[in-house]
Amino acid sequence: MALFYSTELYVTIDQRIPVKEEPLPEALRHDDMSLLMRVLCFCALGRPDLEDHWKSLQSELEFEIARTRVCSVLDNVITAAGVLLATSGVFITTGSPVTYFDYSSPAPYFLLLVSFMLAMIAMLTSGSSKLRWIHTDRQWTRERLKLGGYFVVSYLLSIVTPMLFVAWSLHCFIFGGLFLSSGSLSRSSSILPQQCC
């Protein structure tokens, strides 16, 4: 009778073992950061410094939580950009079903076209940022952030840039609607006195 032995090695990690934390590098300290960097940190991570985010890079579990949070934000940006892209695309490619709303005039059409293009850029940037976050490694991220400067800015902009494009697209869409409604209001206000007389 032959006995078979498994040669696989099973390793379990005890969650109670504390992870040795590295101190925050000089390049990421709050005192050395410019105002622009603080604003970027606040928009991307919810705090004006990188201290909490650096702590999340010390363990694999915390890094996965941070990655899931950022991917969730980017998913929401992709959804908002898709809705804006579809809505402004419908307004651009079809004629107005109601005579009071004329969004083929130059100002609303231009704003709706800009909204369409910004929503498309927002989808592309958020999609590429999400791919970057899915495939990034904790050790690689730590090494990049230690270098500071350009690497930290590009790291933060990968989260903030898609949000900015969605906000600009939404503003252009709203201002296109305001032009559209102001044109219809001026037409209706000029028609009402003629109807009364």
Image (cartoon, rainbow, N blue to C red):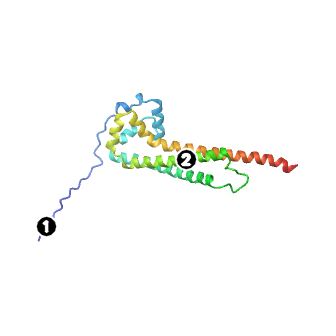
Q: Nearer the viewer, mark 1 or mark 2?
A: 2
Mark 2 Cα-neighbour bin, 10 Å: few <14, some 14–19, many ≥20: some
Q: Nearer the viewer, residue 115 or 21?
A: 115
Q: Write down the quadrant of residue 17 in the picture.
A: top left
Give yes or no for contact between labels 1 and 2 (Cβ–Cβ under 8 Å): no
- Residue 87 pos. (x, y %): 59, 53
Q: In the figure, is residue 101 to the left or right of 38?
A: right
Q: Residue furthest bottom?
A: 1
- Residue 119 pos. (x, y %): 54, 48
Residue flagged by tag 1: what amino acid is it?
A: Leu
Query: Could you tell me if residue 95 is visible in this image?
Result: yes
Q: Write the residue at 55% across / 43% down.
A: 167
Residue flagged by tag 2: what amino acid is it?
A: Met
- The numbered mark at residue 35 is none
Judging from the image, what secondary structure is the residue with disc 1 in?
Answer: loop
Q: Which residue is mark 2?
A: 117
* Above or below, 77 relative to 25: below
Q: In the figure, is residue 126 to the left or right of 113?
A: left
Q: Which residue is mark 1?
A: 3
Q: In the figure, is residue 116 to the left or right of 187?
A: left
Q: Nearer the viewer, residue 15 or 64?
A: 64
Q: Nearer the viewer, residue 76 or 174?
A: 174
Q: Nearer the viewer, residue 100 or 30?
A: 100
- Residue 77 pos. (x, y %): 50, 48
Q: Write the residue at 57% across / 45% down.
A: 169
Number of numbered discs visible in the structure rendering: 2
**Among numbered discs 1 and 2, the one appearing first in the sequence:** 1
